[in-house]
Amino acid sequence: MTIADRWQHVRSRVAVACERAGRAPHEVTIVAVSKTHPASAVREAVAAGATDFGENYAQELAGKLGEVEGPIRWHFIGRLQSNKAKLVAGKVVLVHAVETESLAQELGKRSGGVQPILLAVNLGGEATKGGVTAIHATAIARALVATANVRLDGLMTMPPPSEDPEVSRPIFDELRALRDRLRDELGQPLPVLSMGMSGDYEVAISCGATHVRIGTAIFGSRPAA
């Protein structure tokens, strides 16, 4: 299958998942995860109709910004070091994985405006993954809301890997419940739930995901290092 074929297949599956959940397809943003794929692959996806792309590495994002033209909305979805905030701030529509006040401050200083961000929450308890615990989410969210030149738009999470998409459902439900609670406590809209990837995005949509991050199902396997 070509990238265009895979893109259309994913779009169709998202539409079906939305219909089953009683939602409209426009409520879900498909973020095509283009990390490690060449700019030519991004251009193919743009030609097929994709508009939102996610990168995990600040320097790779910086390179692609100069290589790909078109009506593109870039997202930064990986863990970001504060000293690389300048490569991302003001250049993406959303930073998905902010977990510290210090990173938010760096993004705010360098945004040239207001940088939308998400609080990354680690609900699977995996030591190898970033994100705050649910216990600490309220305190960190309050700090992010008070940070100048950033806007907390919601939450993101990444469940532990599993062959069974349904294993992710409790994590997705927990993130939505946490978002709802924080929304009430902080008086912030928090409209974004970034959750779900190639293996479980249909479950995520049924749980309320507004952004699904899909790489392999669109671009195929990552190029060998």
Image (cartoon, grey):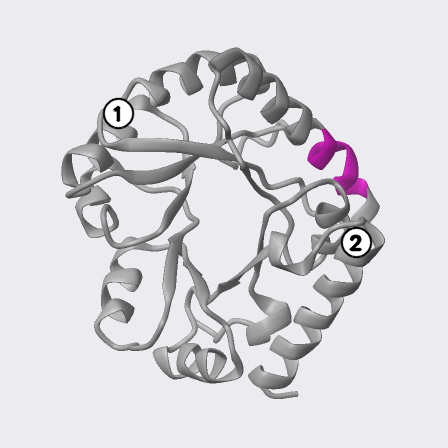
**Which one is in front, 69 or 122?**
69
Prevailing secondary structure class for the magenta stretch in the rendered image: helix
Q: Residues within 10 Å of mark 2 (few under 14, many from 20)?
A: few
Q: Position of residue 21 (x, y in %)?
A: 81, 49
Asked whether residue 4 is drawn in magenta, I would say no
- Residue for badge 1: 102
Q: Quadrant of residue 181?
A: top right
Instruction: Tell me the SS state at disc 2.
Output: loop
Image quadrant containing the C terminus: bottom left
* Residue type at tag 2: Glu
Q: Secondary structure at mark 1?
A: helix
Q: Which residue is mark 2?
A: 163
Q: Is residue 124 visible?
A: no
Count all numbered tags in the image, as a single digit.
2
**40 relative to 221 in the view: left or right:** left
Q: Nearer the viewer, residue 81 or 107?
A: 107
